[in-house]
Amino acid sequence: MKARAWILFTITIIGSFLAFVNGQDGNPQDLNYLLSHEKKLSTFYSFIQKFPQVLLKLPSYSGVTILAPNNEAFKKIPYTVLDEAFKNEDQDIVTSVLEYHILQGTKDAASLEPGKPIFLPTLLTSTEWTNVSGGQRVQAVKQAGNAVIFVSGKGERSTLTQPDLAFTGGKVQVINSILIPPSNITETAKSFGLDSFRGALYASGRVSNLIDNPNLTIFAPNNQAFEVIGPAITKMTIQELGSIIDYHILPELVFSTALINQTSFITKQGQGVKILHSGNTIYVNSAQLVSTDILLANGVLHVIDNVLNPQATGVQPNPEIASQAPVFFGASEVDEPPFTSAIPCTVSCPQTLSTSTSATPSAKNFFRTSSSKALGAVIPRETAVTKAAGLMIALG
């Protein structure tokens, strides 16, 4: 009874705070009243009641937008690893998931421009979960027919089902799927089948740096890009391969909307890459962008169809042909994706003195920060996932 009374008291206090937040157009109502009277949001509201501390951040912002999953969205949870965390009401995990559903600032669905994605900061700012300055992002885009889609980690998509429910501190947007906080680069690359790139990260010793560094943009070549150059890259030394990997990394956050024609960016390797447009096709040097804006725990990932070479910075694409030639001397196509043998074992691993044969770690083991002391012990078996990575595996 005391716990219940404390929750109700906290909600009441929060409601009082929200009255001082900038008002919205129309007839705004108290957030508690709004959520309690929307039957389709009863599950979401129940978690807000159980974890009201997530709302204590709201008065710090000049308006917020709550992306509230409807009841149908929560029905997916019992079939996932996340089920354990929600059943046990794990405060750290559930609170962080809820924070990722709250955008900084008031956003109206009607204000979105068709076909132009925007990347909105959320209240998920803890360094245990994200290493993106200003709060982890959610992508929002209005598609044909005015359908509004929100894209989160692992490219998970959620559709807006009821827009612009006003309350005294902002807007509630009802969505049909839970948003997934983005994961680190190795887990994300695994999810998108970028096995050669993932293996190259391990082979070059770049995994820890790419997980820990903030605000990165990564151009990840697909498997075919590595296959067509084969021994030209697999015979490199660790240092040479590391330089190639660094040439695919920008030490700043660059979404596709900022990849403007004729612009250049300095890479982590020290040399620049140039962005070129031909119609709707975008190139990085001569490599074509094939997938963009995949959110990471510490930045964003774009997939390209060729491996970039810092010794060929001036190469330009020929838009008249579908596939550009490799830019490595001695390139020779191989039948299997290179570097996959460098990927640490994660399933049915041989018993050793330093590893366990367990192939199904508990949900709690997934939810770890990349900066935790456990990271060093976990990386060799590629379970050095952030807490966000656990969510991706859970709802993947």
Image (cartoon, helix red, strand yellow):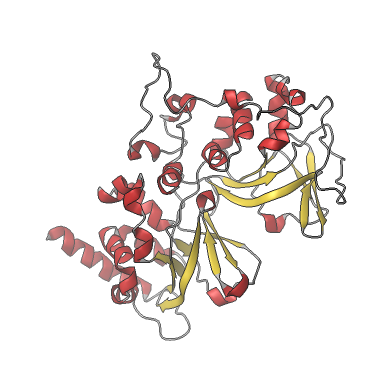
Q: Position of residue 311 (x, y in %)?
A: 83, 31
Q: Position of residue 324 (x, y in %)?
A: 82, 42
Question: If the image is split into quadrants, where does the N terminus sit?
Answer: bottom left
The mark total stands at 0
The image quarter containing residue 359 is top left
Residue 62 appears in the picture as rendered: no
Residue found at the very far bottom of the displayed protein = 26
Residue found at the very far front of the displayed protein = 335
- Residue 176 located left or right of residue 328: left
- Residue 377 located left or right of residue 220: left
Residue found at the very far left of the displayed protein = 1
- Residue 129 located left or right of residue 133: left
Up-down: is 381 above or below 301?
A: above
Up-down: is 322 above or below 163?
A: above
Residue shown at the point (34%, 58%) measured from the top left: 75
Up-down: is 274 above or below 346?
A: below
The image quarter containing residue 50 is bottom left
Q: Position of residue 395 (x, y in %)?
A: 42, 49
Residue 179 appears in the picture as rendered: yes
> Of residues 174 and 18, which is closer to you in this image?
174
Residue shown at the point (55%, 31%) measured from the top left: 208
The image quarter containing residue 348 is top left
